[in-house]
């Protein structure tokens, strides 16, 4: 059963369309990320699920029940806010107890449950601290405990790690992930950080300008982006123009290449996406076996990255950026050197705009 | 003319002014001045709206000096200024009891009546009043009475009884007055009215220090307060003509001005109660520290002139103590019993003397009555 | 503030000392010196004619403070001020809330509208209220033409409270507006998210978080109400004796400067204690 379901949901602010006709189903227990640059509509989507905004059009259900206009307090979801939004006038325990008390849980029970939740985020020593006496990471944990103690159907997380420094962020990422598998609650996670989304999520929805462009698991999002925006937004990528003839054959410059999918019929040109690390580089005319695409090129530039080298290779179809790990036996190529560029057809994705 | 305005700001002025230190300069002998002599511009400190402007212009023209004319709203405000010596005035206009205080505190100088030949124009009944029995320090300026302004409707509602302080103090009468009654927010006047209602002579009570009578009057005031609409010394006349109250304790001139402005002579009337009322007189006096006493003497003489005295009264609608001015005063003023009460009424009017030690007691009892 | 911030602020303060000299001089000249003069007068002697002599220093004026009249007057003033403060709060809070939640453009217009009355002399505004409440004023006339009869609240304590409410409302609105405006609305959302209904969220979060504004506004309203003079005189018909009028009377008709000064000293000290206690509790809460 879907934990969260959006059907043709649109949100308009005056003349600005923040969320544009989105369909989305998030399954029970899933770690789902909404990924996109700021202003893409991901936070608005989350706020509609939480009940802070109401859709202008469309249907929104949680746990199979339509909740379109229910206020936030009538929804079985809880939110971890960006910057945590802990109540500054309450201590840690009071913050965590708040939701339970609002649900009329008897005080003793609420206190026990809150203490347990605080234990699980390892803050038992700080029960009586006020939020401004806590570090960012500690506040983050309180925010998590405060939401999870209510055992919501869905936990909404709005860029929860944005305010933390890199090291803490990485730590929290793995903690969040293990927390997710422990509690088995559906997580809806909003972030603009692709790495965060890729490492933690079961599935990712990439958004841009109010539209949901692609929903897939991290591997497919990375390796088989469907849209030019998705490909471009996530990781480094070569985007090169290819031509298509009437038989559907794709050419990069003069070279015929095979792609992961057939070219759309009737099109004359396509955008081909190629990750730098999925391209291999060998000396000129050295052919590799298997059904690989192979085209000639010349090294234009080489940049040293410590663990790898990056090359710009000029081919008849344009310049390709290639990344090669520095392994003991790997050849280093010099600028001006003719080379053969090769990749598996599956690595070349044809993109829609 | 008494309180023209609330004394709130004056309180601040007093504090500020009093800081100046200012021991009063002891009064010397009378100034050596000739009739019509001037010794500089005149700093004239008078009540608000209490002067005909053309008289000042005329004086400046005639004597070639300038008149710096400033105004105050209460005796106490004037006293504070003169006492503090923050500003030097040549001529002030204290009311009767205030002149008494100023004489006692040696804040005014004896006048040189040789330089004020017109002083003889003052009617004999205004000469040698209790507050200046030897007539040494002042020349009377204008006078008035304290009584009750009441709407003719209210009088009719009560069956046109003889005017009495009972309009204020007798709940059976006051409850019949549509709109209710207001009382002057002035302890002297409130006690004077209460004492008169109780049948006392104000002068006797005050000069003999009759505390018991004062306490009795205080008790009466206390019982009366809940029946009053308000205490007011500023807008009592306007409140009456506007129908805000049906009867008001107040000063003759204030009512006259309000009746005139609102054309209310056919609706409201000023009466002096049968028990007798209060009369008061404002006086011209020269502060002991005056810089230009001769110009001040000349101004007193100028204002006491028969024709000028008439012009003054015709402008400000208060009664004149200047006998010689009578032919120059408008008949409508002379014939207004609210401004010039008939002799039998006059006979029953008393000055409220400076109350000395009783002053504080009256203040406290008055506050007590209100609180 | 962290201790580092404090240290920074202190060193800043040292640097600013020179710049602060004119302000300091101003405060000494126009606040400290007048207060000392009032203090001195409160120990002075009043002569029989009402003259104040700065000699024979005594505590008589302070003795007089403990009479029933003074106690009742203080108590009544306190109550009127308290009622005014609470009414101001009740009226101002929703208004400030509305104000703080408008778009910037609308908000600025509304703020100007709030300020406009302040450009008019307070006395004139009180006389306007007096006219409104008078028996031939518009309210009474409307009431009469609707058959409810004459409407009479002028010269009653109700009129005084209304007048003070009107006079001091802005002092309540502005600090409340500032407090509400700078509140983090995410916290209200958090409360709603944690199952609080709208009113509970307001009670548990908005209200406590705007406490500083409530306290500041209450002090700004209570203090002038407690010593109010003009409003009770004009709208109360001087019938309800309040502390301000009582003090003014000592400097006017009663000519008892020492007693008036003693009353003022007590009033000032009472206000100071209230403000200091408030600051202490606020500091201890942080």
Image (tube, rainbow, N blue to C red):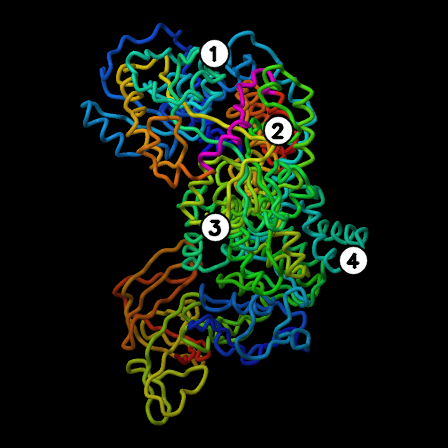
Circle 3 is placed at which residue position?
A: B266
Prevailing SS of the magenta stretch: loop
The quarter of the picture where residue B300 lies is top left
Check chain identity for marks 2 and 3: say if they share one: yes
Q: What are the residue bounds of the magenta stretch? A: B338-360
Q: Are marks 3 and 1 on the same chain?
A: yes
Residue B351 lies in the magenta-colored region: yes
Location of residue C260 in the rendering, given as x and y in whole percent from the top left corner: 55, 23
Comes first in the chain, label 3 or label 1: 1
Asked if badges 3 and 4 are on one and the same chain, I answer no
- Assess whether mark 4 and mark 3 are in contact (beta carbons under 8 angstroms): no
The stretch drawn in magenta includes residue A157:
no
Q: Which residue is mark 1?
A: B104
Q: Earlier in the sequence, mark 1 or mark 2?
A: 1
Residue under numbered circle 4: A105
Dot 3 alpha-carbon crowd within 10 angstroms: few under 14, some 14 to 19, many 20 or more: few
Q: Which mark is residue B196?
A: 2
Q: Chain of mark 3?
A: B
């Amino acid at each position: 059963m879907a934990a969260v379901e959006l059907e043709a949901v649109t949100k308009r602010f005056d003349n600005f369309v923040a969320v544009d006709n989105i369909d989305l189903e998030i399954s029970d227990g899933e770690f789902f990320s909404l990924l996109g640059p700021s202003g893409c509509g991901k936070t608005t989507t989350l706020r509609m699920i939480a009940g802070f905004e109401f859709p202008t059009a469309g249907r929104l259900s949680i746990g199979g029940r339509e909740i379109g206009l229910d206020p936030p307090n009538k929804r079985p979801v809880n939110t971890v806010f960006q910057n945590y939004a802990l109540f500054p006038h309450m201590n840690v325990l009071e913050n965590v107890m708040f939701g339970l008390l609002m649900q009329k849980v008897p005080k003793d029970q609420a206190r026990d449950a809150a203490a347990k939740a605080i234990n699980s985020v390892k803050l038992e020593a700080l029960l009586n601290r006020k939020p401004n006496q806590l570090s960012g990471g500690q506040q983050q944990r309180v925010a998590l405990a405060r939401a999870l103690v209510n055992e919501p159907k869905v936990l909404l997380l709005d860029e929860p790690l944005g305010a933390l420094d890199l090291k803490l962020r990485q730590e929290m990422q793995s903690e969040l992930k293990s927390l997710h598998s422990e509690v088995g609650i559906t997580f809806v996670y909003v972030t603009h950080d692709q790495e965060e989304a890729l490492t933690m999520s079961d599935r990712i929805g990439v958004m841009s300008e109010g539209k949901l462009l692609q929903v897939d698991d991290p591997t497919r999002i990375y390796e088989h982006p469907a849209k030019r925006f998705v490909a471009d937004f996530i990781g480094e990528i070569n985007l090169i123009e290819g031509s298509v003839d009437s038989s559907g054959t794709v050419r990069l410059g003069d070279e015929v290449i095979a792609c992961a999918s057939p070219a759309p019929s009737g099109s004359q040109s396509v955008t081909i996406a190629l990750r730098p690390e999925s391209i291999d580089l060998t000396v000129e005319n050295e052919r590799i076996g298997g059904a690989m695409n192979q085209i000639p090129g010349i090294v234009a530039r080489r940049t040293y990255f410590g663990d790898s080298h990056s090359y710009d290779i000029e081919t008849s179809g344009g310049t390709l950026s290639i990344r090669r790990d520095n392994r003991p036996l790997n050849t280093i190529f010099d600028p001006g050197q003719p080379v053969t560029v090769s990749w598996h057809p599956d690595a070349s994705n044809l993109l829609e705009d | 003319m008494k309180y023209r305005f609330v004394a709130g700001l004056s309180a601040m002025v007093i504090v500020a002014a009093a800081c100046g230190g200012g021991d009063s300069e002891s009064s010397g002998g009378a100034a050596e001045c000739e009739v019509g002599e001037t010794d500089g511009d005149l700093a004239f400190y008078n009540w608000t709206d209490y002067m005909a402007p053309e008289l000042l212009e005329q004086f400046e023209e005639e004597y070639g000096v300038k008149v710096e004319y400033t105004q105050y709203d209460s005796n106490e405000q004037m006293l504070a200024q003169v006492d503090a010596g923050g500003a030097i005035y040549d001529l002030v206009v204290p009311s009767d009891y205030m002149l008494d205080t100023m004489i006692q505190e040696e804040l005014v100088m004896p006048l040189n009546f040789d330089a004020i030949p017109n002083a003889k124009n003052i009617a004999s009944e205004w000469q040698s009043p209790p507050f200046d029995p030897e007539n040494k320090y002042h020349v009377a300026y204008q006078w008035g009475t304290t009584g009750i302004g009441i709407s003719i409707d209210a009088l009719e509602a009560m069956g046109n009884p003889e005017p009495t302080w009972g309009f204020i103090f007798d709940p059976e009468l006051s409850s019949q007055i549509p709109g209710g009654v207001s009382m002057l927010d002035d302890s002297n006047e409130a006690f004077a009215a209460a004492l008169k209602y109780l049948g006392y002579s104000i002068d006797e009570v005050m000069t003999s220090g009759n505390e018991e009578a004062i306490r009795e009057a205080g008790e009466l005031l206390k019982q009366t307060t809940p029946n009053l609409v308000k205490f007011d010394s500023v807008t009592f006349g306007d409140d009456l003509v506007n129908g805000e109250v049906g009867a008001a304790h107040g000063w003759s001139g204030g009512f006259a001005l309000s009746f005139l402005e609102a054309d209310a002579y056919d609706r409201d009337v000023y009466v002096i109660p049968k028990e007798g009322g209060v009369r008061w007189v404002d006086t011209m006096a020269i502060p002991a520290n005056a810089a230009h006493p001769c110009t001040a003497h000349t101004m007193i003489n100028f204002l006491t002139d028969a024709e000028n005295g008439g012009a003054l009264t015709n402008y400000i609608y208060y009664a004149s103590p200047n006998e010689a001015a009578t032919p120059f005063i408008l008949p409508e003023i002379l014939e207004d019993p609210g401004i010039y009460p008939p002799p039998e009424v006059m006979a029953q009017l008393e000055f409220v003397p400076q109350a000395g030690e009783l002053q504080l007691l009256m203040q406290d009892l008055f506050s007590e009555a209100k609180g | 503030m962290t201790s580092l911030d404090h240290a920074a602020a202190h060193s800043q303060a040292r640097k600013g000392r020179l710049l602060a000299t004119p302000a300091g001089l101003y405060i000494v000249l126009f606040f400290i010196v007048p207060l000392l003069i009032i203090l001195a007068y409160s120990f002075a002697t009043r002569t029989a004619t009402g003259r104040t002599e700065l000699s024979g220093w005594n505590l008589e004026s302070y003795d007089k403070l403990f009479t029933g009249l003074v106690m009742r007057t203080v108590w009544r003033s306190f109550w009127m001020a308290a009622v005014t403060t609470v009414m101001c709060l009740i009226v101002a809070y929703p208004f400030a809330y509305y104000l703080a939640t408008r778009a910037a453009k609308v908000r600025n217009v509304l703020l100007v509208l709030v300020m406009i009355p302040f450009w008019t002399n307070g006395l004139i505004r009180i006389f306007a209220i007096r006219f409104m409440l008078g028996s031939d004023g518009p309210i009474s006339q409307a009431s009469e033409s609707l058959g409810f009869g004459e409407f009479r609240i002028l010269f009653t304590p109700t009129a005084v409270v209304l007048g003070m409410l009107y006079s001091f409302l802005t002092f309540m609105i502005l600090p409340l507006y500032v407090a509400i405006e700078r509140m983090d609305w995410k916290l209200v959302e958090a409360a709603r998210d944690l199952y609080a209904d709208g009113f509970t969220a307001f009670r548990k979060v908005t209200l406590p978080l705007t406490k500083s504004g409530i306290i500041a506004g209450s002090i700004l309203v209570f203090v002038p109400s407690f010593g109010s003079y003009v409003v009770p005189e004009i709208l109360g018909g001087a019938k309800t004796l309040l502390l301000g009028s009582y003090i003014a009377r000592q400097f006017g008709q009663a000519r008892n400067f020492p007693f008036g000064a003693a009353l003022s000293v007590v009033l000032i000290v009472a206000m100071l204690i209230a403000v200091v206690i408030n600051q202490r509790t606020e500091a201890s809460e942080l």
